[in-house]
Image (cartoon, rainbow, N blue to C red):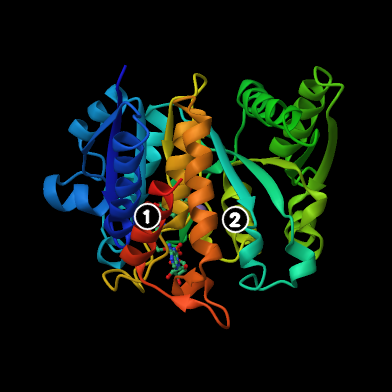
Amino acid sequence: MSKKILVLPGDGIGPEITAEAVKVLEVCRDQFGLGVSWEEGLVGGAGYDATGEPLPPETLEKAKAADAILLGAVGGPKWDKLPDISKRPERGLLGIRKQLGLFGNLRPAILYPQLADASSLKPEVVSGLDIMIVRELTGGIYFGQPRGIRELENGEKEGFNTYVYSESEIRRIGKVAFELARKRNKRVCSVDKANVLEVTMLWRDVMEEVGRDYPDVELSHMYVDNAAMQLVRAPKQFDVLVTGNMFGDILSDEAAMLTGSIGMLPSASLDANAKGMYEPCHGSAPDIAGLGVANPLATILSVSMMLRYSFGEGEVAGKIEQAVSDVLDQGLRTADILSAGMTKVGTAQMGDAVVKALKAL
Ligand code: NAD
Ligand code: IPM
Ligand code: MN
């Protein structure tokens, strides 16, 4: 049966990078016989400009009806000063995650060996790197109530957010991490701030409880400040790293640099039934939007994750990853991963090269 994909290009470089990922989907359909079809929708600033809403109701309906979603990126300076915070492009993205229950965010930081020179760390520190960051995506301080900006009696304003996790929210993301670890190197490191924050004291206790059901998986705990340091000191000590929404956001951008560039890190955001939204971890990159220089590989690799996690098409997913590797072997590099002796290409050239390599497989 044919799978329906909703493509949400979004803002900034979003349309440029999703266009390349769609080219890859076309090859999967035409050459590998994958039963997929897709349509586009509006989200973020593009949704706001067209309809007044960053998540137009029509987009949400299409997202619910789709088998999977491919998203580019949202946001940009044009919308940063909107007086009504609920209209910000980022709220569109957060709305899809929440409304679809996409609580399990997988962000694999894998170093393609060809890019060892592109990382800002020494090649020996990052070579062979393969970490899975599991980020809780629909709770924590991003969604906790109460939140807002209020005026105090002395006339001063005060901003506030609430960092809250229930046991069930922690348990379900814990299970995602342990299940993944079971298929990998059987180590989970849970990252928290349990020396200060009650919410993460509970997080630690629940992770211990979940861990008892996985005696074959080794569980360790680390404070987030140390984890940030360890990620650049000795990143290969990690196998699966599980953490809350905000810590996961920050640590995954940090981990992206271990792989050479933020332009290399794909992601999957899954519900309990592996329905998912797939997107690069980076943002709309306003500084390079429209220039045709953005790296489309994180988005292309997000397609590969879609095939693997939502469609059970591991073989075709593997071909996409192989095609990316082949293109890197050819020495083609977008500006963000450029190193000495390599050939600089733009967004579309990189996408076309992946398509060509894929067709040759
Ligand atoms: P960003 O990830 O957009 O950009 C950070 C830096 O990385 C920039 O220098 C950018 O040029 C570079 N970069 C990012 N993606 C790249 C790619 N594919 N190829 C080459 N270089 C790339 O983060 P930011 O500047 O903090 O945020 C810009 C906007 O994006 C903000 O509005 C933010 O809210 C939004 N954002 C959206 C998402 C998302 O949609 N998932 C994620 C992060 C940030
Ligand atoms: C990400 C982004 C989003 C987040 C923003 C744009 C809401 O940074 O997907 O990593 O913080 O989750
Ligand atoms: Mn982020």
Q: What percent of the width, then of the height, locates residue 39?
A: 21, 36
Quick check: 290 left or right of 212?
Answer: left
- The secondary structure type at the circle numbered 2 is helix
Q: Nearer the viewer, residue 61 or 38?
A: 38
Some atom of ligand 1 lies within 8 Å of the CB belonging to the residue at label 1:
no
- The secondary structure type at the circle numbered 1 is helix
Q: Nearer the viewer, residue 114 or 53?
A: 114
Q: Nearer the viewer, residue 177 or 180?
A: 180
Residue that label 1 marks? 356
Asked where in the image residue 182 lies, by quadrant, the reply is top right
Image: 239 above or below 263: above
Is residue 85 visible to the viewer in this orientation of the structure? no
Q: Residue type at mark 1?
A: Lys
Q: What percent of the width, then of the height, locates residue 236?
A: 79, 54
Image: 218 above or below 12: above
Q: Nearer the viewer, residue 283 or 195?
A: 283
Q: For the N terminus, which image quadrant? A: top left
Q: Residue at x 62, y 65 (%)?
A: 114
Q: Residue at x 75, y 73 (%)?
A: 122
Q: Residue type at mark 2?
A: Ile
Q: What percent of the width, then of the height, locates residue 155?
A: 42, 61
Q: What percent of the width, then of the height, locates residue 61?
A: 24, 26
Mark 1 or 2, which is nearer the eye?
1
Which residue, as the protein is rendered here, is positioned at the far bottom? 340
Asked where in the image residue 285 lies, by quadrant, the reply is bottom left
Image: 130 above or below 278: below
Sequence-earlier tag: 1 or 2: 2
Residue that label 2 marks? 250
Some atom of ligand 3 lies within 8 Å of the CB belonging to the residue at label 2:
yes
